[in-house]
Amino acid sequence: MDSRAPAVVAVIVTTGSGPGLEATAASLVAQNYEELSLLVVANGDALHVPERVAAVAPNAFVRVLEENRGFGAACNEAALMVEGSAFFLFCHDDVRLEPDAVQLMVEAAYRTNAGVVTPKVVAYEDPLVLLHAGQTCDRFGVTRERVELGEIDHGQQDLERDVFVAPGGVTLVRADLFTTLRGFDPLITLLGEDLDLCWRAQVAGARIVVAPLAKVAHRETIATGERAVTAIGTRRASRQDLQRRHQLLVVATGWGRRQVVWTLIALFVIDIFEVALALVSRDLVRAGAVAGSWRWLILQRRRVRQRRRQLRRLRVLSDAELHRLQVGGASRLKHFFVTLVREGYDKARGILPPDETLAAQHETEAAGVGFAAAFSEDEEFDEIAESGLLELRTRPSRFMTSFRSQAAVVAFVALLWLIGSRNLVATHLPLVGRLAPLDSWWTTWRHFFASWSSNGVGSGAPGMPGYGVLAFAGTFVFGRMGALPRLALIFAVPVGAVGVSRLLKDSASNRARIFGAFAYAAMPLGVNMISQGRVDVLAVVAGLPYIMRRVFALMDVPGFRPVPYGEPVPFGHRGWRTTESGQRMVLIMLIAVVSAMAPATLVVVALVVVGVVVARLFEPDPGRSYRGSFRFLGALLLNVAIFLLPMTIDVFFAGRRALEIFGLARGPWSAPSFSLLLRDVDGTFGASWWGWLLPGAALFALVLCRGERRLVASKVVVIAALSVVLAALVSRHWLGSFAPDLDVLLALYALALAALIGLGIAALEHDLRDAGFGWRQFAAGLSVATMLVATLPFLAYFGSGRFDLPTSSVAESLSALAPSTAGGFRVLWLGDPSVVPLSGWSVAPGLEAATSMNGLPGGATLFNSPDSGTSDVIMQAVQSALAGHTVRLGALLAPAGISTIVVMNSAAPELTGVQNVPLHQAPGVLITALDNQSDLSLDLQTSSVEVFSNSLFHGIVAATNPGTTSLSPIFSSSSFSGPLTAGSTVVAGLAPAGAFALDVSGKAASRSTLGSWTPFYNVAPAPSNPTGTIVLHQFPLNGLIALFTLGMWGIVWLGFGWVHRLEWLFTGRRRVVTPRIPKEGDV
Amino acid sequence: MRRVPLLLVVLVLVAATGVVVSLRHPTNPSDLPSGLTVSSNAESTALYCTGISSARGAPGRVTFFNTSSSSRSLSVSVVSDKGNTYQGSIELAGHSAQSIEPSVVDKGAAGENFGVAVQISGGGVVGEEIAGTSRTEVPCRASGVTRWYATGFDTSVGSSAYLSVYNPTATAAVLNASIYTAAGFFAPASFQGVSVPAHTQTEIDLGTQVVNTANVGVGVKVLRGSLEIVGVESSAGTVSFEQGVSAASNEAWLPNVTTAHSATAQIRVANPSDLPAEVTVDVALSPYTITPQTLSVSPFRTGVVVVTPNPAIPAAGYANVTVHSNVPVVTSLATGSGRSIALSSPQTPSDAFLIRDFTGLGFDAETLTNTSSRTITLTTSSFSATNPNVTALTGGDRLDGGATVRLSTLMPSVATTHDAILITASRPTLVVSMTLPSRPKGVNVVTPLDGR
């Protein structure tokens, strides 16, 4: 009976000694496929080949070629000799086929209508180890195995499927397809001919299928270097050379016109990167191979054009269709970065085309991995199996995954931080930013309850809640108020970093949280605020992460409320804190505390809520709505306003200055540029190129996130954008008097960047493994690298031991300028709000006016009511000078007892090589205006400060003697009491006028204002030597308001279960605690 | 998921903000508002004048004019170069004028040069200092300067030039003065760190350092405080005031440059920058077309373009001269007859000028020039001591771009009035220039008052 099986011609190409030729021929002879003919092509050196073949396959044909032109050329030659064959089976001379291999491959070819069929290839020495089950490749022609190195064949790959490349060794090709493709390209002598043939076959629309049941063992003597490459034209080329140039040829000819340009450009960039790395690591072979491949391609440009023309005629699949059959991204880069992250640079640079490193791995594989190894209990086995070319998804990096390593790193960084802040512990703190020396614990409480403050020309506005917070905090340091700013300087950033870690608690691993926390600490803002003494902003830096976490939780941002709120519990009972109401109250109190220190926190909270809403508009959270968010925000702000009642009252009565509660407008000319804002820089730290690293890492991180992390990242990035945009608008003074503190806005931006970095690390751990390799992996590597580099500049700042906080300040250097006169005096401080060391009011953009009484700023000038009240006289006088409307500013300021005007351009003097401080120039017109005043004289002029003295100064409290008009200072400057002249008129620069009275020998003197804001007191002619005292007569409304506020805080605090806990205080018996039985589903 | 749109929106938002923010470079304003408008509702203003001399029996004087309709109290302080100070007060009725002669106040004390400081309760008062010859006058300043440039001074035989420096403030001032000549730049040691105590007046004689040199430029940098500075040129008995400028500029307009026979007119240029200046002088003299004159001035040097006599420029009345330079330069106009010259500074374009005949000689030419290419609208009004209200004279007159018009054309009655005239323009591109009657014509150029 005639066979109906299609004819197959097996072509064995043998070269040189061909150590496995007999085995190859014998295995083909042993095939159970009847219509199989054997043709052996002796490529070049044909010594004893006919005899050797005849010994095992007497029916085989032997064709001897004079020259070794390569495997492809030999196959082409063989194909020309054969007619009528349906298939060619191209075999290397170092393979061994299972007896049914050809039959199974032919069957698969018919079953799947494949043009090319490849068998399952196993190791020659250990058939249980898989070498190939077909291959795929990326757009750059880099092939990628479908099996892992050393993978044991359990039949897991025994599924017939399409592959992109049929790896050389044994390949069944349909004869008509081979003819159509014009066979192998003779230009490709060795290494890469399989990729080329398969690529062209794919373009021509042929399927390439792996038939895994057909099993072939392959020694791969050429690829592993066991046998030398002897083909013509390859003598001086290494395997890398051949592989790289052939890959490049395939890529340059395999794509359509448009695609090839983009692909070659991308490949060129990648190759430059690889060459640079190779040169750095002195891997000249690789560098030469990469560079040589491009040179070779240029030399072969004619052939390239020819091939492109040929392929164009054959083209069935479009580029897009072809690319869909490939893997995405760049395999070579992926391997590099994955290994770089996990194994280090030395390993990473060795993963490129199989060379010595790969060979060594093969050796290791052959020596140690076998069937038995698959069941080995030795951990080394796993290490071997997972090392090298494995995907990241099989084993995430173990760097910093154990508790011990994380704790060690955290401890190390904490130690570094403490070393860096060692000189903040005990040495002198300069009078910069908000580092004015605090008053005693008791006096600070008094500021909170005070009916009158000396700010400006005096104010009866309620005391700012910041004093209450400071005094309360002072309780925990046993009244050592001086410790508070030091604690803030040293611990605010670390506390904030811990907050970032908590923020990411349910969205990222511990490792990612640590990275996020470190990123927050490394943000320039924190260090700059320390160096500028901005304790108020540091309070925000410390508290904001906790606020954001709670806002996210209450707005039901995915991943931020892992546990549902507890069942409603009555106010005051245990568990109320865990209810939604309790959580809201915690958030409100937290915001209130931070806002008391820096009211711009309220703006930041609003930005967070708006950011979530905006993000939800574009990317709705499943099952969550943005409706009600603004009601939530309104409720938050309203409650905070109640908790900060004194401040709310101040704002209510502040009129047009109400918005100044959030901050004063800085001079656009000295505000950070947009570039600096993007780097989160307001100061000297981070203003160089490396300041871009952390924002860059955050940006990369942003694109890595997927799934739930993506939803969170979207919100965070919107918040970051809103904060930086608002900061930019504020810095240019484009929002009028609404000028929230720039640094508070930057604190939010810093937090958003740090959160993004943390999320990015989490994405590296989880999301990256789900994505095809490409730019994401590149971005990942880059972001990790930038993060590490970004933290290095910190080391330079550790040197000073005080994060470059100046050792001296401008203000302190002026203490000698204070006049030692009776009656007291005021100093008017003018300058950019960022450098004036006390709280004041805005006169113009970049110009704050504030006063201190009897010398330098102190604890009484830390917070200021936005309601300027009578103090407007000072602002109006300065504005009048700025407008050129007066040349007698001294006369206008004299009633307020202003003796000195200090114009500050920086908070501290610039000392070359010692301290570097940012210069924030006051408006230039101010100096011009002050220079023009006829009653002011310039006493001191430096780049940091200009000091003018008022020639018409007469003290805060002055008197005119009978018959004269000139004013002379009277009374003690501290107590406003002392001897008087009978019949004199006393004028006091204290506002409000109605709140003060002059007690003359126990009787109140008559008071008038004479159309002025200052009270005038007429001293009676008798007795002849009276003594007087200025006394404050004010109903203690401010104290009552403060008391009410404190009481409210106390009541709410009791609500967190303390009513329940302290029940015995009121009832006299202890409450019996009933153990709570956990319900099903409770966490 | 609509992530790309969100990222796109965010990216566009941030990028747009960045672009918009970066496009505008905020500058730190350093100039005080000045002029009548500012002063009208001022609490107090001041006027500072210096350069007034009692020399040669023709004492200079200062005339104050109240542009407001309310009376003003003036507290006058006269300081002589001998250190004597005199205080006095003047009550100036609305729209009225009053002069003081410092040499009369200082009679017997032998002071030769004087500084005058006037503090006014309120605003709206302007002052003009007039040389004893009534051939030159410059406005008093409302504030001191910290930078001052002038050029064109002659120290050749028969001429002298000095800077009259007055410190009206309570702060001792310090200045550095630099000299530019055609031969080069130098900063004499005696001109460095010059201290001017508070409320004192002093002179810096250029002739002590620059001998027998024509066209001397001066740059003054006030290191501390602010000063009132006026350059005084005395050339063959002709005294002229050079008010100077606080900054060099790329353009200067000199609308009334004489081309009369036997007159001389030179455009004198100093280049205070470190780049060579290529200066082009365009001379417009209807109906002639005149080739632009060019001049190269090396860094820190001076140069001169002769307009009259110049064979390329016919003698045909007043020429309208415009100076352009590739780098900021300082320009002055030197006019005269025979050996003497008088200096005057170009006028800075503005939207308001105040013209008043402080010398009583009347004006030979009063021209209005629109320095821009766009048409402006002019309005004129007058102040009269007899009329408390400001009288509108003309309104809505249009002046084409680049055009020059005589005030008498615009307002024929101007020749007969002695009132002050306020000219306002719709855009700050107007330059007003006046010359006093002289023979030959146009050698005494008067700087009008800033009317803002």
Image: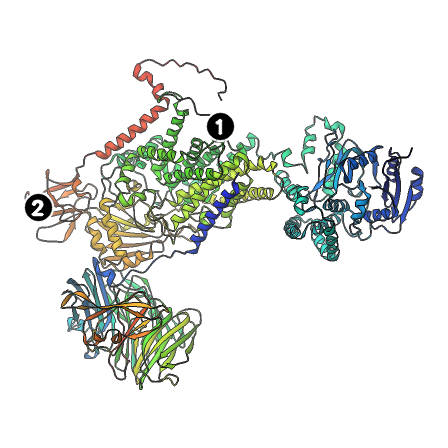
Horizontal and vertical percent for residue A632?
38, 33
The kind of secondary structure element at disc 2 is: loop
Instruction: Please give the label number shown on residue B227.
Output: none
- Chain ID of residue with mark 2: A
Judging by the rendered image, the residue that carries numbered circle 2 is: A982
Q: Is residue B376 above or below residue A133?
A: below
Q: Out of B104 and B326, give the one closest to the viewer.
A: B326
Label 2, residues with CA under 10 Å away: few <14, some 14-19, many ≥20: some
Could you tell whether A471 is left or right of B78 in the image?
right
Q: Position of residue A967 (x, y in %)?
A: 15, 51
Instruction: Characterize the local packing of mark 1: few (<14), some (14-19) or many (20 or more) Cα atoms within 10 angstroms.
Output: few
Q: Are callouts 1 and 2 both on one chain?
A: yes
Q: Quadrant of the N terminus of chain A?
A: top right
Query: Which residue position holds label 1?
Result: A562
Q: Is residue B408 left or right of residue A34?
A: left
Give A355 or A761, whichever is nearer the viewer: A761
Q: Is residue A335 left or right of residue A1058?
A: right
Q: Is residue A620 above or below residue A229?
A: above
Residue A518 visible? The answer is: no
Mark 1 or mark 2: name the one nearer the start of the chain: 1
- Which amino acid type is marked by label 2? Ala
